[in-house]
Image (cartoon, rainbow, N blue to C red):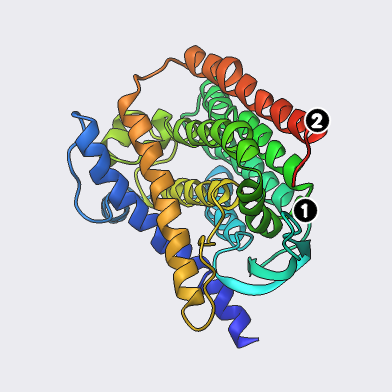
Amino acid sequence: MLSTWFEITIFPGFIFIIILALLSEQINSRLNSRFFISIEKTPMFIPMIENFKLYLKGEKESTSKKTILQSIILVLMVALPLFASLLLPINLWGTLPSWAGVYGGYPGTNKGVVGVISFEGDLLFLFAIILFFGFLTFLAQYLNKQHFAKESLTKTFTFMIFDIPLLFVLVSAIIAKRSLSLTLLAEDIRRIVNFNLAFGLVFLLPIAISVSLFCLAMKFDQPYFDRINTTGIIRSNAPTPKNWKLNLWNLSMRLMEVVIAGLIVTVFLGGSYLPIPIHGDFQILVNTANFILKCLVVLMITTIIRALRPRMRINQTFNFALKVLTPLSFLSILLTGGYIGLVGLN
């Protein structure tokens, strides 16, 4: 029981994901300052600390039903990605939901890296959490004293529109493995690619990885979600007051960004697995380091994409999501299904 609570709360649970979020924020802030001239390099863990200072200096709010409800929603927005992180297979070794690895003559196994919570269908459960998180962003903005319902709804749609192509590229991996388990996808996608190089390197991975990276980069690139410069957030009409609520908002956004990066790593980049099997006492350490490194690389690439591409208007953002990324992700499904149906997998 004690070990279970340790896994949930500390490692690889809540504390681990929060530290990873803070680390990625620091690295991405410095990386962004190199590619985006208008952004200055910020000290360690900014804007987290700056938000806390704003809380200390902030004006006291009068308590009302809307204020209490908005506070509950913001706390829930932080709790959702923390809970979702428990589904990611990071470093725990255990029993897989079903038999895996029967490719290329490999005998298969029922043991592998699992999440704190693992079951068949956990991928859909994780994606449902991502969608519900998007709905909460609308409520958090709508409950402001000086809210604009149309603007709040538009920003929320812009935030959630990139979930459509992201879901489609995940479907292509589901078709390849025929499983809805994150642990089985992390275990088998790498073997499928290894024994079917033409399928993996031509049909599955290039489109899927490219689309998922652009989805992650642009999903969190809206003015309300720009966390590189705290004063910039305030000048662009932040959706929450300049106090502890803003801190919760920014923390929830960074945590969800890390969770989605972990989802991309799990499904398309082999999760925490290395090409060379590692056994013994160093397995947990090596798997953890590999997962962290892959997540940071994904987040660094998305930061570079955000810094280099020009700003888009709302209609341009919608068009890019629906007319570029979504058709590409649907093409990934067609190519994956067509190859498996016509050629098959070894």
Residue at image point 68% right, 42% down: 173
Residue at image point 35% right, 23% down: 309
Q: Nearer the viewer, residue 305 or 240?
A: 305
Q: Nearer the viewer, residue 261 or 227?
A: 261
The image quarter containing residue 136 is top right
Q: Badge 2 is on which residue?
A: 342
Query: What label sits on residue 121 in the rendered view?
Result: 1
- Label 1 Cα neighbours within 10 Å, binned few <14 / some 14-19 / many ≥20: few
The percent coordinates of residue 171 (x first, y second) are 71, 37
The image quarter containing residue 277 is bottom right
Residue 61 in view (yes/no):
no
Q: Nearer the viewer, residue 320 or 59?
A: 320
Q: Is residue 216 above or below residue 64?
A: above
The image quarter containing residue 233 is top left
Residue at image point 74% right, 31% down: 339
What amino acid is at disc 1? Answer: Gly
The percent coordinates of residue 185 (x first, y second) are 68, 53
Q: Is residue 187 above or below residue 34?
A: below
Q: CA distance from mark 1 to mark 2?
A: 27 Å
Extreme front residue here? Answer: 105
What amino acid is at disc 2? Answer: Leu
Please identify the quadrant where the N terminus is shown: bottom right
Tag 1 near tag 2, CB within 8 Å:
no
- Label 2 Cα neighbours within 10 Å, binned few <14 / some 14-19 / many ≥20: few
Residue 147 in view (yes/no):
yes
The percent coordinates of residue 271 (x first, y second) are 56, 56
